[in-house]
């Protein structure tokens, strides 16, 4: 006669989203959007900094690497 071993059942616990996790998510999203603006959208002509091209020139090669046209 065969004997079968039963494995213990795993208790499934619900995932709770805490306020701290929500703050981290919002902060990371905002940081990502700001970085996306500075790397991809800031063209100099529509720059937050006016006529200053320092941000554009600083991330110029990264823009091309990520596929953003800038000329």
Image (cartoon, rainbow, N blue to C red):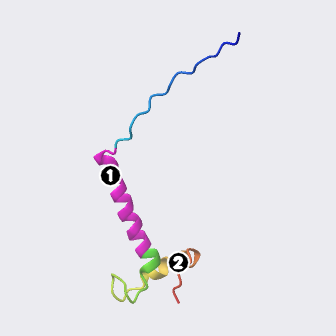
Task: State the residue in front, 58 or 30.
Answer: 30
Disc 2 residue crowd, few under 14, some 14–19, many 20+, Cα 10 Å:
some
Residue bearing the label numbered 2: 63
Please provide the residue range marked out in magenta: 17-37
- Using a 10 Å C-alpha cutoff, classify the residue at mark 1 as few (fewer than 14 neighbours), some (14 to 19) or many (20 or more): few
Note whether 10 is above or below 31 in the view shown: above
**With respect to residue 6, does 17 lie above or below?**
below
Farthest residue to the top: give it.
1
Quarter of the figure with residue 42? bottom left
- 56, above or below 71, in the image: above
Residue at the image position 39 percent from the left and 68 percent from the top? 33
Question: As drawn, is 10 to the left or to the right of 16?
Answer: right
Position of the N terminus, as image quadrant, is top right
Task: Find the residue positioned furthest to the left.
Answer: 19
The residue under label 1 is 22
Q: Quadrant of residue 13?
A: top left
In the structure shown, which secondary structural element does the residue marked by tag 1 occupy? helix
Q: Is residue 53 magenta?
A: no
Q: Secondary structure at mark 2?
A: helix
Residue in the image at 55% along x and 74% along y: 66
Q: Residue 52 appears at what percent x and percent y?
A: 38, 86
């Amino acid at each position: 006669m065969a004997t079968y071993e039963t494995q213990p059942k795993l208790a499934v616990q619900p995932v709770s989203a805490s306020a701290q996790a929500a703050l981290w998510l919002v902060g990371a999203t905002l940081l990502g959007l700001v970085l996306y603006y500075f790397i991809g959208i800031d063209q100099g002509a529509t720059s937050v900094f006016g006529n200053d091209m320092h941000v554009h020139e600083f991330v110029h090669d990264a823009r091309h690497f990520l596929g953003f046209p800038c000329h």
